[in-house]
Image (cartoon, rainbow, N blue to C red):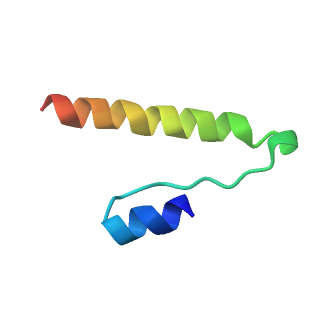
Amino acid sequence: MLQHVLKEAGIPYIAFKYAENSGQMQPIREQAGTFADSIKLWSGA
């Protein structure tokens, strides 16, 4: 539902799909953290 509303409003978003018990969460956390750091750097320019 949220993705549909964001798409209709033209707001960019990222969606992650993962299985919590399969050990996939740590790489996702690291990638999301790196992405967030990039956004902080971009907004400071």
Residue at position x 48%, y 54% in the image:
14
Residue at position x 53%, y 39% in the image:
31
- Front residue (pair 38, 6): 6
Residue 39 occupies quadrant: top left
45 w.r.t. 22: above or below: above
31 on left or right of 13:
right
Give how far across and how far down residue 8 sits, in percent: 37, 71
Q: Quadrant of the C terminus?
A: top left
Residue at position x 72%, y 38% in the image:
25
Residue 9 occupies quadrant: bottom left
42 on left or right of 29:
left
Give how far across and how far down residue 28 sits, in percent: 62, 41
32 w.r.t. 8: above or below: above
- Front residue (pair 40, 13): 13
Give how far across and how far down residue 18 sits, in percent: 73, 51
Give how far across and how far down residue 15 sits, in percent: 55, 55
Residue lying furthest right in this view?
A: 21
Total of numbered circles in the picture? Answer: 0
43 on left or right of 2:
left
Q: Quadrant of the N terminus?
A: bottom right
27 w.r.t. 4: above or below: above
40 on left or right of 26:
left
